Image (cartoon, grey):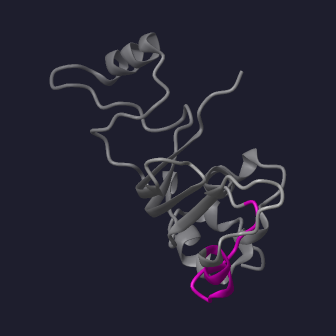
């Protein structure tokens, strides 16, 4: 049975013309990936209630998410240090890329990362024992400090460290 394990949280700005979905773009900034595994911090009891009661209530409601009133431990969150731009084009088979997309790709403003996945990144960093192989972008030196900030388990995925 599949259960949620990683949640993403970000600021998203999306662009699309009102009359067509031929071009859609989104920019995600302040991207945080958060472990939502069952071992996540249990909810804090309300004043006067005990921890066993709070955990029992959570299990009865079958909640997979963490208590929003509780701080997230540093080893259960990783902050991705870059914005993520995704452009989706609905082009016919013989259509060329729009010039502005070609210009953007040719510029040095973007770093293309083939098949990048926020969720694979979050799982590899926060739950490395759950992945069969690490994504290739984990070795990028510009990600090292954000990975190390998630604690020793996360830092173990950095090759050569």
In the image, taking residue 142 as reference, residue 60 lies left or right, namely left
Using the image as rendered, state which of residue 105 and residue 71 is in the foreground.
105
Is 10 drawn above or below residue 137 in the view shown?
above
**Secondary structure, magenta segment, majority class:** loop
Left or right of 108, for residue 15: left
Query: 146 or 89, which lies in front?
Result: 89
Residue 36 part of the magenta-drawn span:
no
Q: Is residue 130 left or right of residue 9?
A: right
**98 shown above or below 3:** below
- Quarter of the figure with the C terminus: bottom right
| Residue at (32% x, 38% y) in the render | 68
Q: Residue at x 53, y 59 (%)?
A: 25
The range drawn in magenta is 101-115
x then y, percent, for residue 133: 83, 56
Is residue 106 highlighted in magenta? yes
Q: Is residue 83 left or right of residue 141?
A: left
Tell me which residue sits at (45%, 32%) in the image. 65
Residue 143 in the image, given as x and y percentages of width and height: 60, 75
Residue in the picture at 54% in, 77% down: 145
- The quadrant where residue 137 appears: bottom right
Q: Name above or below for residue 55 compared with residue 118.
A: above
Residue furthest top as drawn:
60
């Amino acid at each position: 049975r599949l259960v949620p394990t990683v949640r993403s949280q970000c600021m998203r700005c999306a662009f699309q013309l009102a009359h067509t979905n031929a071009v859609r773009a989104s920019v995600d900034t302040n991207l945080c990936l958060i472990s939502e595994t069952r071992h996540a911090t249990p909810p804090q009891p309300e004043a006067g209630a005990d921890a066993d009661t709070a955990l029992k209530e959570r299990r009865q409601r079958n909640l997979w998410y963490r208590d929003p009133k509780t701080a997230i431990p540093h080893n259960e969150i990783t902050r991705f240090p870059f914005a993520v731009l995704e452009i989706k084009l609905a082009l016919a088979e013989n259509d060329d890329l729009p010039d502005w997309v070609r210009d953007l790709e040719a510029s040095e403003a973007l770093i293309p990362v083939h098949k990048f996945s926020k969720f694979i990144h979050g799982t590899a960093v926060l739950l490395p024992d759950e992945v069969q192989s690490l994504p290739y972008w984990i070795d990028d030196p510009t990600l090292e400090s954000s990975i190390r900030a998630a604690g020793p388990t996360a830092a173990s995925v950095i090759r050569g460290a």
